[in-house]
Amino acid sequence: MKILITDIKLHPDQPLILDEYDVIRFKQNDIVNYLLKIAPTDIIDLKLSCSFSNEDWIQFYQLIGYSLQLFDDHEEISDEICERVRK
């Protein structure tokens, strides 16, 4: 049986957690967060200088522990994706 690439979710969703300030956010990946902290650039410079896919950015926002509110408010993230991560 062949699996079509369209049948595969390319990036898994990070679990949602409640932080110490009662903010719902994605569980951050400590390795990705560390790499971001030591990088010679910040997210804005990275966004402006690199042409990563929208799907990669969506996963990146989850891996760095974005709050669900910021994620929902992001203009490049569709309502369908926001609904999917809330399930």
Image (spheres, rainbow, N blue to C red):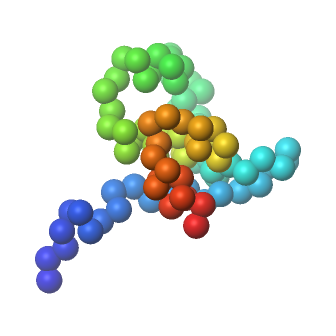
Which percent across, then down, holds residue 50?
A: 34, 23
| Point 55% across, 46% down: residue | 62
Q: Residue furthest front?
A: 79
Which percent across, then down, holds residue 7?
A: 26, 68
Q: Nearer the viewer, residue 32 or 1?
A: 1
Q: Does residue 19 appear anywhere in the picture?
A: yes
Q: Nearer the viewer, residue 75 or 19?
A: 75
User: Which picture quadrant has residue 71?
Assistant: top right
Which percent across, then down, holds residue 1?
A: 14, 83
Which percent across, then down, holds residue 14?
A: 55, 56
Q: Does residue 32 appear anywhere in the picture?
A: no
* The C terminus: image quadrant: bottom right
In the picture, measured across the screen, residue 18 lies left or right of residue 87, that is right
In the picture, measured across the screen, residue 19 lies left or right of residue 1, that is right
In the picture, measured across the screen, residue 19 lies left or right of residue 62, that is right
| Point 21% across, 63% down: residue | 5
| Point 43% across, 23% down: residue | 47
Q: Is residue 70 above or below residue 62?
A: above
User: Which picture quadrant has residue 8?
Assistant: bottom left
Q: Is residue 2 above or below residue 84?
A: below
